[in-house]
Amino acid sequence: MILAITLIEVAFRVFEWLIIARVILSFIPHNAYHPVCRFVYESTEPVLGFFRRLLPRTSLPLDFSPLVAIIALEVIERLVINFLLRLG
């Protein structure tokens, strides 16, 4: 059970770091066709796109979907881990 919880924590942490990497990439000039950049964008877009559709549009040129996604991922991670702890 401890191994499963550790793997879940690592998976969520890696995905959160991918979201942070995407935020950083949005501030610096980069080659969008570079394999690393493509991996970051393609792996995070399904989640960020979902939250972008949920959030109301603002007049600010800021995208709050990464922040909301990280908060939601933290909540989901805690729920999953608590569920696993109650099972075992």
Image (spheres, grey):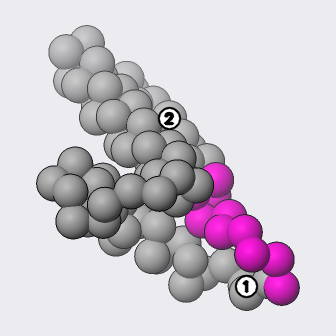
Quarter of image, res 34: bottom left
Query: Does the magenta run of residues contain 67?
Result: yes
What is the secondary structure assignment of the residue under circle 1? loop
User: Residue 2 location, x and y as percent?
Assistant: 25, 12
Q: Which of marks 1 and 2 is in front?
A: 1
Q: Furthest-left residue in view?
A: 35
Q: Which residue is at 52% across, 52% downward? A: 28
Q: Which residue is under mark 2?
A: 78
Question: In the figure, is residue 32 to the left or right of 79?
Answer: left
Quarter of image, res 55: bottom right
Q: Which of 4 and 30 is in front in this view?
A: 30
Q: What stretch is highlighted in magenta?
A: 59-68
Q: Which of marks 1 and 2 is nearer the N terminus?
A: 1
Question: In the figure, is residue 66 to the left or right of 4?
Answer: right
Query: Does the magenta run of residues contain 64?
Result: yes
The vertical placement of 15 against 44, above or below, is above
The C terminus: image quadrant: top left
Is residue 83 at all visible to an observer of this figure?
A: no
Q: Nearer the viewer, residue 47 or 61?
A: 61
Q: Which residue is at 61% across, 47% downward? A: 71
Q: Distance between the residues labelled 1 and 2?
A: 26 Å
Q: Which residue is under mark 1?
A: 56
Q: Within 10 angstroms of label 1, few (less than 14), some, or many (20 or more) residues? A: few
Residue type, mark 2 in image? Arg
Question: In the figure, is residue 51 to the left or right of 58?
Answer: left
Quarter of image, res 68: bottom right
Q: Which of 59 and 7 is in front in this view?
A: 59
User: Residue 17 location, x and y as percent?
Assistant: 42, 37
Name the main secondary structure of what is drawn in magenta: loop
User: Residue 67 location, x and y as percent?
Assistant: 64, 53
